[in-house]
Image (cartoon, helix red, strand yellow):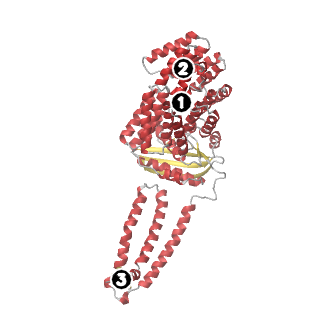
Amino acid sequence: MVSVSQFINELRRRNVFRSAAAYVVIAWLLIQIADILLEAFAAPNWAMRAIVIALAVSFPVVLILAWVYEITTQGVKRTEAVSEDELISVHTGRQIDFVIIGVLIVAVALFAADRFRWIDFGTAPSIDLRSIAVLPFDNLSGDPEQEYFADGMTETLITELSKISALRVISRQSVMQFKGSNESLPEIARKLNVDAVVEGSALLVGGQVRITVQLIEAATDVHLWADNYDRDLSDVLAIHSEVARAIAREIQIVVTPEEAARLADVREVNPEAYRLYLLGHYHLYKWEPADLEKAVRYFQQAIELDPQYAQPHVGLAKYYGGVGFYGYMPPRVSAENARAEAARALEIDSAMADAHAEYAILYFYYDWDWEKAEEEFRKSISLNSSYAWARQFYAWFLAATDRAEEAHASIRHALELDPLAVLAYMTEADVFWLSRQYDQAIAKLHETLDLFPNEPQALSRLGRNYVQKGMFAEAIDQMERAVTLSPGFIEHYWMLGHAYAVAGETAKARKVLNDLHDLAKKRYVLPLAFAVIHTGLGENDEALEWLERAYQDRNMWMVYLQAAPWFDPLRSDPRFQDLLRRMNFPE
């Protein structure tokens, strides 16, 4: 019987150990080469996995071959057929040693090249790059019907880059201001206050997508990096993950291990589901009734095709939350639908910042659970520090709970991320209004209208502040303009009714009330709208009755009961104080 020591000696004699070592080193070298080449040729994710599996499966085969065969002076023979004078094991062993040493030298050189290949000392950024804007991708198809796809590619890359907390990434609404712009890149970068910009183009043909991306230093207009990606549409999320990582390497930004893991955690998506999601997202942002109907239909179709695709659920949550807030749907119905969609999105991916933000909005506007709302807002912002949407709503939350200073800080941060977003400007004006800083609110709204002339929501808000200063003629003028520009937006109309009421134009205020009653026979109208107008008319009993209905309906505007100047005439009434108590506002 052969002893263990004899068996080990035989393994040594047959160079099995050396062969194993040589194979491991060569396999590692092949993996490094594959990593470089596969990325350069934009190979699919499974290619690297296939190479690693093949090398692992081959390892025991190499060991068996080393045991069974010998290299002799007359060539390769089976070990049992080799005589002692034919053996050259020692010489073979030395050759294997030389092979191992040589491969190790090449491997170390390749490792060093790969480690530093993204640093170009001749073209390194001249400044510290810590902020970036992804400009709207060009639609290379020339087909206007494909604009949704190019816009979707823009937003997806923004989302991926926003996972890097050390990088300030400008939000979609601001960069879309430059779609089709002829302004120079340095000028665009100045307006957005960024160090670098990303330009790109997208082309969708059948199930194939081609994306071209280039990174440009804003101050000098110097091109730092560029690449092309040709993939199946099902692999499009992986493309954006790769681009985000490549940009991070190029500008030498710190990416934490958690962020690296999230960037690497991508899944294939059903190509048609992804296309439908982009269409839904494109129409959702228009916020017109016909477009909203299309958005819902596209999101639902995407979910039917790919139930594990989380983004369409977030799109539906935003839709239901929005139509509930503006009174197009009863709050109880809209909130429960939004909650179901946000919950499903988080079941699929618990690290979705936008899903956590939608949950925070529900806790805030519908549940009136102030503690959980703040927890979810903070969670969303921690997952995506560049998510301006979450910071805007967090500012409203802070203002509603009498934390004006924190609210201003939150909205200022949002404006840094979304410097040309009309909603961010108006949110800051709202914070001033809720904290009764009317002059500051008016100044901010004039600034908003300079950037966005005839924006109806800015005009309506301007009028709302004029009302509080007793400038009724100016208030009514601005609010009537808002109603004329956006006749289907009921919020402008009932706020105009309040302006008529406090200005003493009682007949006009009552006409607004009658119109709202007629409209309520056809669709849902916010009870709070009636309460605000009755308060302006000095009809406190009727106002409190409507506020009670709003409370029972879980009317989302009720979160401003404590802070909104509308209700100042009611504050001393015990019934109003009881409402505040039941709202359970934080101390």
- The amino acid type, in three-letter code, at marker 1 is Asn
- The amino acid type, in three-letter code, at marker 2 is Arg
Q: Earlier in the sequence, mark 3 or mark 1?
A: 3
Q: Is residue 160 visible?
A: yes
Q: Earlier in the sequence, mark 2 or mark 1?
A: 2
- For this rendering, which residue is in front, 572 or 319? 572
Q: How far apart are labels 3 and 2 at the CA level?
A: 95 Å
Q: In this picture, is 455 found above or below 9?
A: above
Q: How far apart are labels 2 and 1 at the CA level?
A: 15 Å
Location of mark 2 (residue)? 575
Figure quadrant of residue 521 = top left
Location of mark 3 (residue)? 3
Percent across and percent down for residue 336 are 42, 32
The count of marks equals: 3
Asked if the residue at tag 1 contacts the one at tag 3, i.e. Cβ–Cβ closer than 8 Å, the answer is no
User: Regarding mark 3 in the picture, which secondary structure is present there?
Assistant: loop
- Label of residue 584 in the image: 1
Q: In the rendered image, which quarter contains the N terminus? A: bottom left
